[in-house]
Image (cartoon, rainbow, N blue to C red):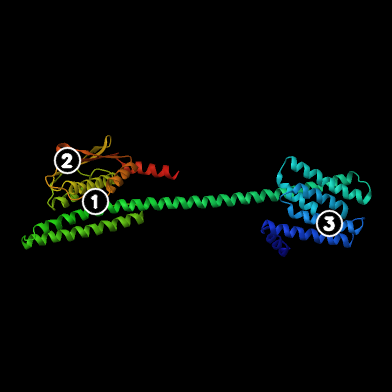
Amino acid sequence: MVTYRNALRRVVTLGPHAINAVSVAFCLFLAILAVKVPWAPLPRVVIAGAGLVAAGAVWFRDRWPTAVTAIGAGAYALSGNPGPLLIGLFSGAGARLGPRFAALAAIGVAGFLAQQWVEDGSFGTDALLSAMAATAAVLVAGGYTATRRELTRSLRERAERAETERHLRDEQAKAAERGRIAREMHDVLAHKVTLISLHAGGLEVNSGAEPARIEREAALIRVTAQEALEELRKIVGVLRAGHDDTFPDLRRLVESWTSAGNAVTLHGDLGTLPAATARAAYRLVQEGLTNAHKHAPGAPVTVSVTGSPEDGVTITVTNERSLRPAARPSGARAGLVGLAERFRLIGGTVRGASGDAGGWRLEGRLPWDASTRDTHDQDAAGG
């Protein structure tokens, strides 16, 4: 029994041409048996001819099942070989209820009765009931098989579509993560490298300064480079862990700029802000100081942080007009673009505009607790 089931399973998994070839071979085998026994009271030549024609027609069972069933019914009446009739009914049963299904049922019943008529010259009620039962059984079996085949194909298509969609979501997540990494790297490197460049420029201009000052500036360059590496390590750790437990120190950021010779005034702090809001505000101040040094070197800068749970948080970085020419601008505003996107995702806005006396003002507005908005956005994206 196990061997028979395995063989049947292998036949079912074959392609349509292979199944047609097996069906034709099976009908030819039955035709040989019908001639040898014989299975009908007609001459062997008629039995053989009917069997060969019907067996050949079985090859087209998928394209013209109704015609194959009709040929099979005639062959069954002439040769007693039921193979082509059964295969035709089975193949055409996938049509469900409709004109073709009704035609198949009528041809099936007529074929079974015709065979009885050829043998006995008549048929009774029992023969009619038997013909109807046999036809119904084959059609039900064929319909069930066709339904399972369609269901399997549908499930396979759904699985392939789900796999494709999962692949697209993975690619989108990777692209978003790459964008996040790029923004974080830009925020850290642009700030720290600008400080290093500022200290190194001071050494270059004052190459004849006292050794103590040169030593102090070189130490500042070394410390700033170490801080850059440390912040990069933190970013990598956050990207791996998925969260950031560190709280940004705005006063230390401003002190790093004032120690490099810049005039930076700070009003307010991040101490009372929620962590997510404080980190976004810190990045805006970092970007603002970097841009102020790039486009208005030496100009005084004012940093202000104000807000309340009712009104939200406002962060401004304002620089006056520089009396020294700015260095050749580099980059493609990637920092401001990334900053604006960061604020947008947590319900905030970023706006840059000319300030008083030809300076520049960078302003950001945030809800008081940006982490709540960020969580809602993630839930909406996931749903």
Can residue 39 be seen in the rendering of this structure?
no
Mark 2, other Cα within 10 Å: few <14 / some 14–19 / many ≥20: some
In this view of the protein, which residue sits in the foreground, 114 or 304? Answer: 114
Q: CA distance from mark 3 to mark 1?
A: 86 Å
Provide the secondary structure element on which disc 2 rests.
Answer: loop
Provide the secondary structure element on which disc 1 rests.
Answer: loop
At horizontal 12% and vertical 59% (from top left) the residue drawn is 204
Instruction: Give the quadrant of residue 28.
Output: bottom right
In the rendering, at what x and y percent does residue 297 appear? Answer: 15, 48
Q: Earlier along the polypeptide chain: callout 3 or callout 1?
A: 3
At horizontal 79% and vertical 54% (from top left) the residue drawn is 84
Residue 312, numbered label:
none
Instruction: Give the quadrant of residue 225.
Output: bottom left
Residue 330, numbered label:
1
Provide the secondary structure element on which disc 3 rests.
Answer: helix
Q: Disc 1 residue type?
A: Ser
Mark 1, other Cα within 10 Å: few <14 / some 14–19 / many ≥20: few
Mark 3, other Cα within 10 Å: few <14 / some 14–19 / many ≥20: many
Q: Quadrant of the N terminus?
A: bottom right
Q: CA distance from mark 1 to mark 2?
A: 19 Å
The residue under label 3 is 51
In the rendering, at what x and y percent does residue 145 appear? Answer: 70, 51
Q: Earlier along the polypeptide chain: callout 2 or callout 3?
A: 3
The residue under label 2 is 359
Does residue 36 sit above or below 357 in this rendering? below
The furthest residue to the top: 310
In the rendering, at what x and y percent does residue 308 appear? Answer: 25, 37
Mark 2 touches mark 3? (CB < 8 Å) = no
Which one is closest to the eye, mark 1 or mark 2?
1
